Image (cartoon, rainbow, N blue to C red):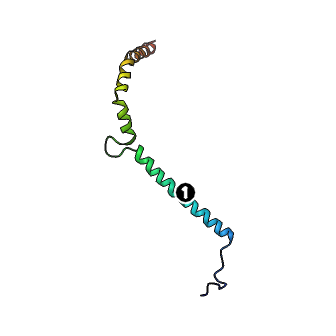
Amino acid sequence: MNQNSPQQAQPSAEDVQRDLRQLQMVDRIMGLEAENARLAALFIKPAGPRFGYNRMLDDVWSSRTWRAGRLVLAPVRAARAIARKLSGER
């Protein structure tokens, strides 16, 4: 067929705009899926014990600062536990 035949009408401006919006949405969805995969890799724990968010917590809990803070606050925690026990017995 000839390119200028009446059976092959040119798309209207409205059709072009609709197709452009559709392509932009598909592109946006693909970007969001990639971002979701990146964040899932950071925060979802895989089969191994020290990955992602859990590894960060393990690093904090094993730090010298965390252990020193727990040692300093041990009497406060003990006093609170005693106070809870005494208030529960009344």
In percent of the image, x 44 and y 50: which residue is there?
Answer: 38
Q: Position of residue 55 (x, y in %)?
A: 36, 38
Give the answer, above or below, for where 40 lies relative to 87: below
- The picture places residue 54, in percent across and down from the top left corner, at 37, 38
Residue closer to the observer: 80 or 87: 80
Residue at the limit of the structure toward the front, as seen here: 64
Using the image, determine if residue 29 lies above or below residue 48: below
* Circle 1 Cα neighbour tier, 10 Å, few/some/many (<14 / 14–19 / ≥20): few
Residue 3 in which image quadrant: bottom right
Say which quarter of the image contains residue 50: top left
**With 4 as the anchor, is 59 left or right in this view?**
left
Q: Position of residue 63 (x, y in %)?
A: 34, 29
Q: How many marks?
A: 1
Q: Position of residue 79 (x, y in %)?
A: 41, 14
| Nearer to the camera, 31 or 7 | 31
Between residues 39 and 84, which one lies in front from this camera angle?
Answer: 39
Residue at the extreme left: 48
Q: Residue at x 43, y 47 (%)?
A: 40
Kind of residue at badge 1: Arg
What residue does disc 1 label?
28
